[in-house]
Amino acid sequence: MYEKLGRHWQTLTITILVLLALSPSPIALPFLHPLQTAQASLKLGNLEVAIHQLEDAIEFERALAGLHLKVAELAFDIDNIDTAGAHLDALDTQNLQGHEAYCLLQRVKIRAGEFTGLDDAWQGLIIDCPEAISEIEQLALDRLASNDLDETLPILEALAKTNSLNADTEETYAYARAALAPVDSLPLLHVLARRADQTPLLAIDLILAIESSSGEPSPTFTLAQVGQTFARHGRWKLAISSLEHALEMDPDFHEARAYLGLSKDQTGENGLDDLLAASDALPDQALPQILLALHWLNAGEEEQARDALTIATQLDPLNPAIVAQLGEVYTGLGDLATASIAYRRAADIDPKNPAFWLLLARFSNQYEVEIRSLALPAARNAVALSMNEAAPLAELAYTHLLLGNNILAERLLWRAITLDPYNAQIQFYLGLLLDAQGNRSGAWTAMQIASSLNTPGRYQALAKRWLEGVAR
């Protein structure tokens, strides 16, 4: 911004000097004054004031018509597109529009959303007006955010052909290309995978998905694999583009339709019709029921989520994730006895996975269900299976705190804090421990730390509630 201001007021300095040299008479003073005050306003960063003062000078003296460009630049800098456009039109009317004004006009049109004649000429515009690249990049990102890949790709391709992609837009281009033309995107994805600084995990997963499905007779399968990969990484709009493209080719690709319903739900659209269609078409598969259950959970319909997950567990009884999710639903419905059975079942199915032992311990501790016989052995198993993870240590510490074993709880909590000092859950547990030991000031400090940390969010909220209660 300061560089722009310097450029503008230096231009006015030259203009004023020329006027003083060519017009020594007092006649020039009525428009020299606004020029001089505009220069002062620019130095102070008052762009709007400077614009009005320059407009006064131009109105008084037509010989200053060339300043329309400077006013347009100033207006563009403060995103006053209407004023910028008006002054560029004035230049055109007086046949004073040069190359610089032409390029600024294209930038104004892009910001104003006027693309007539531009959509087929991006490459030429980038070459002729490199200063417009930032606007062109932003337009591509805006179109991508609107899930308009057909309109986004020509812009990104033009940027790529002119070597105008930065690191972020290069990644955006590769993913947008993968969403519609997976095989063609492989060279772009491999470039991302060879980055010296940090390889995007999504790029690697897309390469694996595309190359592993390259032997399939139809490109539909590859598109669906790409869509599912985008969904697993939470890139929902790109997932929608790939999956919709796959379903255009093969409307009976029901697994793709199930993922499409999930992706729509995650972007605020209603994916229920797609999910119901997939579950009806695939009555012997658990996946549509799982995704349908997630839809019902997001909609607050826990009983319907329970029914869908019950069907899913019948179709895939050895899947611990489905069983654990069912436990969460039963918890929400207030059926703690059945929830306890579900969580135990999940841990029994996959006893070497610490995540399911941790879920069981948290459930038992949070709802005080058989803490000594349920939470304690579950938390111990989670710690034994993941010795260097903070979360199981913290849960085991909290279990001992609930059982009154404060010394052991404190020892475990400090081990957990050493591994993850910026975890709201661990700091919250420490605050509870210190408060139980009578150390109110230490508890207050721990709770303040917990309340300032964003993850996990539930414990940040609990810490704030504790602080508010103590402050009353």
Image (cartoon, rainbow, N blue to C red):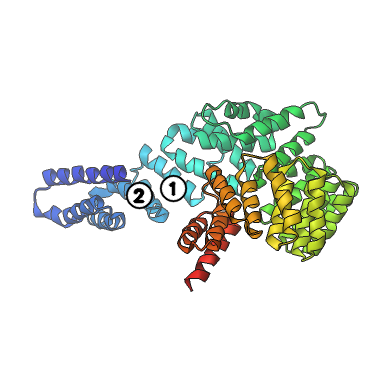
**Residue at disc 1, secondary structure:** helix
Q: Are marks 2 and 1 in contact (CB under 8 Å)?
A: yes
Q: Does residue 176 sit above or below 67 in this rendering?
A: above
Q: Measured from the top left, where is residue 275 in percent x and y? A: 80, 53
Q: Does residue 436 sit above or below 86 in this rendering?
A: below
Which residue appears at 70% of the width and 30% of the height?
Answer: 208
Which mark sits nearer the N-terminus, 2 or 1? 2
Is residue 158 visible to the viewer in this orientation of the structure?
A: yes
In the image, is 3 to the left or to the right of 313?
left
**Residue at disc 2, secondary structure:** helix
Amino acid identity at mark 2: Ala
Q: Measured from the top left, where is residue 437 in percent x and y? A: 53, 61
Q: Nearer the viewer, residue 6 or 130?
A: 6
Q: Nearer the viewer, residue 197 or 254?
A: 197
Disc 1 designates what residue? Answer: 108
Q: Does residue 130 sit above or below 271 in this rendering?
A: above
Rate crowding at label 1 as few (under 14), some (14 to 19) or many (20 or more) other CA atoms within 10 Å: many
Disc 2 designates what residue? Answer: 72
In the image, is 332 to the left or to the right of 187?
right
Q: Nearer the viewer, residue 243 or 266?
A: 266
Q: Measured from the top left, where is residue 225 in percent x and y? A: 75, 37
Which residue appears at 50% of the width and 28% of the height?
Answer: 163
Q: How many marks?
A: 2
Furthest residue in direction bottom, as rendered: 472
